[in-house]
Image: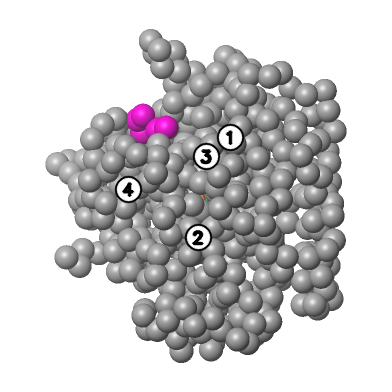
Amino acid sequence: MQRNNFGGNIRVHPQSMYTPASEQEVLEILDRHHGQRIRCVGRLHSWSRAVECNDVLLDLRRLNQVDPIADGESLLASAGAGCQIKHLLSELERLRNWTLPSLGLITEQTVAGAVSTGTHGSGKNSMSQYVVSVRIAHYDSASGKATVTEISSGDALRAARCSLGCLGVILSVKMKCRPCYNVEEAFHEHERLADVIAAEDRYPLQQFFLVPWRWTYMSQYRRETERPASKTAWLYHWYRYLTIDISMLLAILLIVRVLGIDAVIRFMFRRIIPAFVIRDWHVVSSSSSQLVMEHEQFRHIELEVFVQKSDLESAMSFVRQTLCIAAGTDNAIDESYREQLVSVGLETQLNEVSGIYCHHFPICIRKVLQDDTLISMASPAESESQEDSAQAWYAITFTCYSGSRDQAAFHKLGSFLTHSMAALFAARPHWGKLGYLQPDKLRALYPQFEVFQECCQTFDPDGLFQNDWTSELLRNNR
Ligand SMILES: Cc1cc2nc3c(=O)[nH]c(=O)nc-3n(C[C@H](O)[C@H](O)[C@H](O)COP(=O)(O)OP(=O)(O)OC[C@H]3O[C@@H](n4cnc5c(N)ncnc54)[C@H](O)[C@@H]3O)c2cc1C
C-alpha cells in the first residue's frame, strides 16, 4: 500500500489505510488501533514531511459535507475535513452566493489539509485565520477511548487553526465566509521593488513575481471591486490559462528537462516570456476565478519562506545574488553579501551551491497579513501579538520543474537559502513545502511554539497522532 504526494518527493506507505464515511467510523478505527500511530492525509499536495505515515493512515475524503450557517451578522460554513476547497467554493456559491475570504493559488486541497499547514493567498490572512471552530477526534485521557472535542476558543483554537495534524483527526472545520465578490486584475511591470510595494495601497490583493535573469518585478495587480464582471473576462481567463499556465510551462519543461541549456533559460526570461504578458489589461471577474490559477497542471517541487515587511528589500537582493552565484553568472560577489554570510557563519556553504543550478521559474511574492495562530507562518513574530497591518509577512516561493533525477541541485540551493535566510531574516519555511531546517531551528522561529507544544500534549499526551518528523519537532527541549 503506497501513495505518492503531488511532488513525487514523499512516499507514504502505511500498514493500514481507511477512508471512513462518518465520525462514528473514525472513532471505531481509533479504538481498533489504540497504541499505534495514526496520521491523516488530505490530497497529499504538501511537499513536506508533515504527510509521512508508516502505521495507520486516514483519508477523510468521504467526510465532505458543506453546511452554510448564518449566525446573526456572521456567515459561517461547516465543512467536512476531506472536502476539497473547490467543492466548498462551488457549494457555498450554489447554496448562498457566498465564498471564502482567502484562497491559495489552487483549490485542490482539502479543508483540513489547507488549514493544517497555513495555506494562504495574497493580501489577506492565511485560511487558518478564518477558522472559528474545529471538531477533533482523539483519545479521552481518563478512559483512553476515542472521543470528539469541539475546539472553539483560546490557545487550543489558535493551535487547531494550523496544527500539522498534531492534535488528532480533524473531522470538520467551521470557517468564516462572505458574500461573493469581484476582483479587478491587470499585469504591470516594475523595475524597483519599492514601486511594487507602493502599489499595494491601490491593489491590496496583488501578488508579484521577480522575473529571473531580467530582474524586474511583474505584478498581478488585484483589488476588490463593486464593478460587474467584464465582458472580456472569459477571453482573459483563456489567455491567462493558455499563455501562463500552459505555454510558459511547456516551454520551461522543454528547456529544463529536454534541452538542459541554461543560456536558453536566461534568454527566455529576459526576452521571450515577458513579451507574452499583456500589461494593463484591467479585467473584472469573480474572486474565485481571478485568485486561482492552474498551477497543479505539471508536477513540480516548491520551497517557500516568509519574511517580514521590514526585511523584504534586503531579502530580495540576497535572493538575487544567491541565484546568480548558483547559476555561475556572478563571480564578483558583493562585499555586503559576503559580510552577511560571514555574520551567520555560512560563507563556506556558499561554495557548495556555486555554479550548480540555473533557476527557471518566476519567484512569486505574496503578502500575508498577521494571523491569530500559534504556528502558522504568518503568526506573530513577537509573543505579544499586535493588531497592526505593518506586521504583514511576505511569502517568497521558489519553484523547480527539474525531473526527479535532477532535483539534487535545487535541494542543495533550497537548503542553503532556507538556512541563510532563517539566520539573516528569521525567515520561516512554509509547513507544507520543502523543509530543510532542523527542529530546533524551526522552533526558534516561533515565539509561541511552547504553547503549541502544550496544546499537543493536552490532546495527544502519548504522541499517537505524530509521525517521526512531528515527534522531533514537538520534542520538548526547553
Ligand atoms: C500545485 C500546488 C499549489 C499550491 N499553492 C499553494 C498556495 O497558493 N498557498 C499555500 O499556502 N500553499 C499552497 N500549496 C501547498 C498546499 O496548500 C498545502 O501543502 C496543503 O496543506 C495541502 O493540502 P492537502 O489537502 O493536500 O493536505 P495534505 O498535504 O495531504 O496534508 C497536509 C497536512 O494536513 C494534515 N491533515 C490533512 N487532513 C487532516 C485531518 N483530517 N486531520 C488532521 N490532519 C490532517 C496532514 O497530516 C498534513 O500534516 C500548494 C501545493 C501545490 C501542490
**Upstream in the sequence, badge 1 or badge 3?**
3
Per the model, the C-alpha gap separating discs 1 and 4 is 25 Å
Q: Check disc 1 and report the residue beneath it.
A: 202
Q: Check disc 4 and report the residue beneath it.
A: 380
**Upstream in the sequence, badge 3 or badge 2?**
3
Disc 1 residue type (three-letter): Arg
Per the model, the C-alpha gap separating discs 2 and 4 is 20 Å
Q: Check disc 3 and report the residue beneath it.
A: 123
Q: Check disc 2 and report the residue beneath it.
A: 313
**Upstream in the sequence, badge 1 or badge 2?**
1
- Left or right? Give the position of 310 relative to 282: left
Q: Residue at x 27, y 43 (%)?
A: 385
Per the model, the C-alpha gap separating discs 4 and 3 is 16 Å
User: In this picture, which residue range is highlighted in magenta?
Assistant: 130-134
Disc 2 residue type (three-letter): Glu
In terms of secondary structure, where does tag 4 sit? loop
Asked which quadrant contains residue 373, the reply is top left
Ligand 1 within 8 Å, label 1 CB:
no
Instruction: Give the quarter of the figure containing the C terminus.
Output: bottom left
Foreground mark, 3 or 2, reads: 2
Q: Nearer the viewer, residue 437 or 165?
A: 437
